[in-house]
Image (spheres, rainbow, N blue to C red):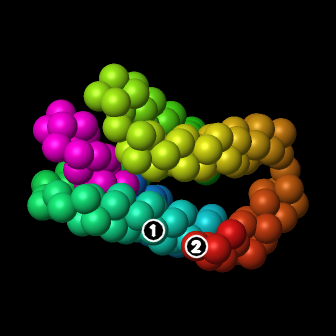
Amino acid sequence: MNNKKLLDLLNKQYNFEIESAYIYKAMSLWAAKENWSGVANFFHQQALEEMFHASKLENYLLDIGYCVKLTKISEPKAEYSSLLEVFKDAFDHEKQVTANFVEIMKEAKEVPDYKTEIQAQWFLTEQVEEEATFDDLIATLERISDSPAGLFQFDAELAQRKFSPEA
Ligand code: FEO
């Protein structure tokens, strides 16, 4: 496979996954500073998951003989006004990831490149879950925003998350 446009899109997404990890790590650090230790854990685990996604793309690109390139990462947002803002930003970010893979899928179909289509399909399936997770968490937060006990429980539940590549 030597379609330059498609390879460059994959390399761009590889970097975007690393940038995602960086953004989620910044969210984790903000939550830790605000004493939401469960939320801090949730975003730390999310950052680990994004690095796993980057590794998956890296392995694919290396396997097909592409010279993987790292690009500059912008400084992530470090301050948030509320938990709701953090989760809404994360949801928007995931929607962008989905849009990126839709573009990769469209290009792979046009080439055509069936191997890359299979890769894009894996990520698009993953995106259904990623978006649903943030959508659910935002709905919960909106429901409990005035309840200290509810927020305490929300934080405690997110403390349980542990990323595993096998899951
Ligand atoms: Fe790797 Fe959350 O998308």
Residue drawn at x 42%, y 32% as measured from the top left:
105
List x then y, in percent, for residue 112.
34, 30
Q: Position of residue 160 (x, y in %)?
A: 74, 75
Instruction: Give whichever of 82, 45 is nearer the camera.
Output: 45
Residue range in magenta is 1-18
Q: Amino acid at mark 2?
A: Pro
Spatial separation of the CA atoms under disc 1 and disc 2: 7 Å
Would residue 157 be seen by someone viewing this image from the given angle?
yes
* Residue at image location 28% in from the left, 46% down from the top: 10
Of 164 and 73, the residue lying toward us: 164
Q: Which residue is mark 1?
A: 52
Q: Amino acid at mark 1?
A: Phe
Q: Is residue 59 left or right of residue 9?
A: right
**For mark 1, does the 10 Å Cα neighbourhood hold few (<14), some (14 to 19), or many (20 or more) residues?**
some
Rendered view: 163 above or below 57: below
First in residue order: circle 1 vs circle 2: 1
Q: Is residue 43 above or below residue 89?
A: below
Q: State the residue position of label 2.
A: 165
Q: Is residue 35 visible?
A: no
Q: Residues within 10 Å of mark 2 (few under 14, many from 20)?
A: few
Question: Do the residues under discs 1 and 2 have CB atoms within 8 angstroms?
Answer: yes
Q: Residue at x 24, y 37 (%)?
A: 6
Where residue 162 sits: x, y (%)? 66, 76
